[in-house]
Amino acid sequence: LGKFKFQKVVENLEGLIIQCLFVLAKANLAGTGICLQHHIFHAISNCSKAIHMMLDKYNVLAPIQKSLC
């Protein structure tokens, strides 16, 4: 059960990072209006918070995985 939880956290973390990279790429598009830029930067901030929370979960579960090996 612990290994399943850890794998799920890793998959969620990977997904969040990829999602944030897509949002960052969108922010660098030419012709992006100021309103859309504010929306994108708000999304980046939310993405960053989500990644931080998922990293906290990862850091809790990682030492447990090492002891299971």
Image (spheres, rainbow, N blue to C red):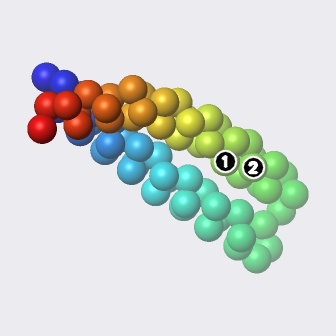
Residue extending farthest to the top is 1
The local secondary structure at tag 1 comes to helix
Q: Is residue 12 above or below residue 29?
A: above
Disc 2, disc 1: CB below 8 Å?
yes
Residue closest to the eye, 18 or 3: 3
Residue extending farthest to the bottom is 30
Query: Which residue, given by chain and number where applicable, does mark 1 sit on?
Result: 44
Q: Does residue 32 appear left or right of residue 7 in this picture? A: right
Query: Which residue, given by chain and number where applicable, does mark 2 sit on?
Result: 41
Q: Does residue 2 appear left or right of residue 18 in this picture? A: left
- Residue 15's spot in the image, x, y percent? 40, 49
Category of crowding for the residue at label 1, using alpha-carbon neighbours closer than 10 angstroms: few (below 14), some (14–19), many (at least 20): some
- The kind of residue tagged 1 is Ile
- Residue 21's spot in the image, x, y percent? 55, 60
- Residue 28's spot in the image, x, y percent? 71, 70
Q: Is residue 29 above or below residue 17?
A: below
- The kind of residue tagged 2 is Phe
Q: Is residue 63 above or below residue 35?
A: above
- Seen at 46% across and 46% down, the residue is 16
Q: Which mark is residue 57?
A: none
- Seen at 54% across and 61% down, the residue is 22
